[in-house]
Amino acid sequence: MNLERSSGILLHPTSFPSLDGIGDLGPQAFYWVDFLAAAKCSVWQILPLGPTGYGDSPYQSFSAFAGNPYLVSSTILLDEGYLTHEDLTDRPIFPESRIDYGKAIQWKLKILDRVYENFKNHPGNLESEFIEFKEKNQYWLSDYSLFMAIKDTQDGHSWLDWPERLRKRDQTELIDFSKKNAELIERHAFRQFLFFRQWLKLKQYANSKGITIVGDIPIFVSMDSSDVWSNPDLFYLDSEGHPTVVAGVPPDYFSPTGQLWGNPLYKWPEHEKTDFDWWVRRIKATLLTADLIRLDHFRGFNGYWEVPSGELTAIKGRWVEGAGSALLKKLKDELGDLPIIAEDLGEITQDVVDLRDSFGLPGMKILQFAFSDDARNLFLPHNYIQNCIAYTGTHDNDTAIGWYQTAPESEKDFARRYLMSNGEDIAWKMVRCVWSSVAVYAIAPLQDILQQGPEARMNFPGKAEGNWCYQFKPSDLTPELAFRIRELNTIFNRIPEINRIPIQRPIIKYMKP
C-alpha cells in the first residue's frame, strides 16, 4: 500500500457538538471536514461506527456491519422535510461538553421513531431509496433487524437469555415472530437506512476535499451481537450458544492477572472452509464507510490468548495459532493492495512483525510510549521507519497533558530534554515532534491539538463507566488553530499533491494610454 506523506486528526463523530446530546452527522460534521481541509490535514481517523450497547463502547457493537443510529442528524432530517419543528419542541437540555448517553439515547430513539412515522405517512422519494438499500444489504440487514427486534421484545436482554427457540433460531419460531413483528423489524432496517444515507454523503464530501477516512475494525465481535447469533458455527460455542473459550490478554508487568475481554473466539477452521466469506464481507462493508482500515489487535490474527469460559481472570489461558496469513492472503486476492493499518501495539513477537511486513502493512508508533527507557526505544521518532503511522496518543491513552502530569519523573525529564520543552507546552511539542518524523502519516487526537487535560480523555481501559463521553465545543475550531496546523503541515511537507491548491492571484491588465 503506497501512502502519501500526510497528517490527520483522530476524532469520533460522537464527539461533535450537537443539540441532541451526542455528536451526529449533521452540519457540525461538515464543518469539521471544512476545518480539516483549511488546516491541510488529509486524514480523518474515527473509531468503529457500529451500534453500541451496554457501556457505549464502539468496540462492543450489536453488529460488525450495521451503523450507529444515534449518529443520525435531526437537523438534516428537518431540512429535508422528514421531521417538523413540532417534532423537536420537546428536546431536552443536554450537557455542553460531555455526553449523557442515557438521556441522549432516549431522545434519539424518540426522534427516529417520529421520522419513521412521518415516512410511513408520506414515503415520497425515500421509499424507492429504502427498498434499494434493503436489497443491497440483505446479507446482513435481515439478520440484524430481526435480532434487534427480538431484543426489543425481550427488554434488551442478551440473546443468550432469550427463549430457547428464538435463541437457537428455530425457523418456524422466527417466521412466526417476523409476521407478528414486521413493523418493528422494518423500523430497525429504516434506522440503518438513515445512518448509511447520511454517512455516505458525509464521506463523499470529505473525499471531495481530499480527505482520507481511516476506519477501525475490532478483531473480535461482541458476544451479544447479531453476528454470533446468526453465525454460531463460526465461533467456539456450546450447544446452548454459550462460549466455551473467550478472548483476553495474558498477565504482564502492568496486569498480573492479564485482561479478560470475554469476547467469543473465532473457529478459524470453519472460516477457512468458507474461504473466509464472513471476513471478506466484513472488510468490504467497512470499506464502503472508510478508505483505510485500522485492524485492531493485529497480533491476535497470528496468535491469540484463549481463556476457558467461566474463568474470573486471564491467568489460565494459552496461546493459540490464528489464521492471519491465510486471511490476509484471501483479502489481498479480493482487494489487491490491502488498505489496512496494523494495530501492532503491546507485546509483539517476531512472528507478528513478519506477518505485518510480509503484506507491507504499516504499523503504529505512539509517542507517549517513547520515554520509558533510553534512546533505543522504538517509539522515539528517530527510530521510526517510513511505513508507519505515528501518533501522540490514541483513544485508549490519556491526553498528552494528562500523560505528562502522571508520568514518572524520569519519563518527564527525558520528554522535556527530547522535545526541548519546559513542560508547559508539552502537548503541542509532542504534536510537532510526530509531524516532523519520517512516518508517512502523523496523527493526533483532537484533544492534543487543543492542548486539553485528562478531563478530555476518551477512554480508560478497564474502567467500566464514564468512557466515550468527550465532546469539543464549537468555539474550539478557530481559524487561528487551522492556520497553526496548516503551518506545521507546510513546514514538514505533509500536504499531499492533490491538496496543494495554489493561491490564485488576480491578473491585472492595464490599458495602454
Image (cartoon, grey):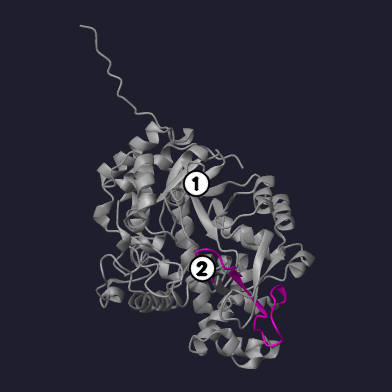
Residue range in magenta is: 233-256
Mark seen at residue 205: none
N-terminal of the two: label 2 or label 1?
A: 2
Q: Main secondary structure of the magenta part?
A: loop
Q: Position of residue 431 (x, y in %)?
A: 37, 44
Magenta stretch: includes residue 468? no
Residue sitting farthest toward the right = 273
Q: Position of residue 480 (x, y in %)?
A: 25, 42
Question: What is the spatial separation of the Cα atoms under label 2 and label 1, in whole angstroms?
Answer: 21 Å
Q: Position of residue 53 (x, y in %)?
A: 47, 76
Q: As displayed, is residue 200 above or below residue 508?
A: below
Left or right: 133 in relation to 417? right
Left or right: 239 in relation to 368? right
Q: Quadrant of the N terminus?
A: top right
Instruction: Identify the residue shown where x is 32% and y is 47%.
Output: 426
Magenta stretch: includes residue 241? yes
Instruction: Identify the residue shown where x is 66% and y is 51%.
Output: 350
Q: Look at mark 2 in the image and give the residue it sits on.
A: 255
Instruction: Identify the residue shown where x is 54% and y is 68%.
Output: 66
Residue 183 in view in this figure: no
Q: As displayed, is residue 404 above or below residue 249?
A: above
Q: Quadrant of residue 64?
A: bottom right
Q: Nearer the viewer, residue 25 or 21?
A: 21
Mark 2, secondary structure of its residue:
loop
The answer to whether the residue labelled 2 contacts the one labelled 1, judged by CB atoms less than 8 Å apart, is no
The mark closer to the camera, 2 or 1, is 2
Left or right: 134 in relation to 428? right
Going by the numbered disc 1, the residue's amino acid type is: Phe
Residue 285 in view in this figure: yes
Q: Look at mark 1 in the image and give the residue it sits on.
A: 379
Q: Quadrant of residue 231?
A: bottom right
Q: Quadrant of the C terminus?
A: top left
